[in-house]
Image (cartoon, rainbow, N blue to C red):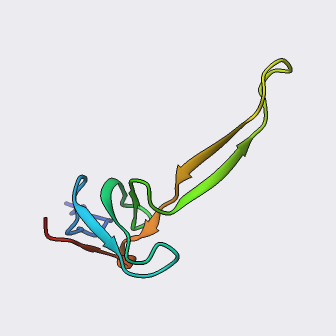
């Protein structure tokens, strides 16, 4: 009988927790955890680490758009804030 092991680490963070970024461009910013990406050990935080995405128009008569999206941050670069 084979025992199936859990591939992913367990995190002390949950969706909705308040965290502070401790390194990188967004250092010292505080935000709420939106998504946890277990396969890559990263988190997405609301309104932090914003990136710009330029999208072409899908049809000739419509204009393209410029979207701002949140990029993931490695879980080791954030810490939980008491609140």
Q: Position of residue 61 (x, y in %)?
A: 83, 17
Quarter that holds the C terminus: bottom left
- Which of the 4 quarters of the picture holds residue 63? top right
- As drawn, 19 above or below 44: below
User: Horizontal and vertical percent for residue 6?
Assistant: 26, 64
Q: Out of 78 and 31, give the one closest to the viewer.
A: 31
Q: Is 34 on the left-hand or right-hand side of 24?
A: left
Where's residue 79, x and y in %? 28, 75
Residue 30 in percent (x, y) is at 32, 67
| Residue 63 in view of the camera | yes
Image height of 61 relative to 35, above or below: above
Quick check: 17 left or right of 54? left
The residue lying at 36 percent from left, 72 percent from top is: 75
Asked whether residue 5 is in view, the answer is no
Q: Residue at x 60, y 57 (%)?
A: 51
Taking 65 as reference, is 51 above or below it? below
User: Quick one: which residue is furthest to the top in this view?
Assistant: 61
Q: In the image, what residue occupies the spot 39% across and 53% down? A: 46
Q: Residue furthest left?
A: 83
């Amino acid at each position: 009988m084979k025992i199936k092991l859990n591939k992913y680490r367990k995190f002390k963070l949950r969706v909705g927790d308040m965290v502070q970024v401790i390194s990188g461009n967004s250092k010292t910013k505080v935000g709420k955890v939106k998504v946890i990406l277990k396969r890559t050990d990263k988190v997405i935080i609301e309104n932090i680490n914003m990136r710009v995405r330029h999208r072409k128009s899908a049809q000739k008569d419509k204009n393209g758009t410029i979207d701002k999206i949140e990029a993931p941050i490695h879980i080791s670069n954030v810490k939980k804030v008491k609140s």
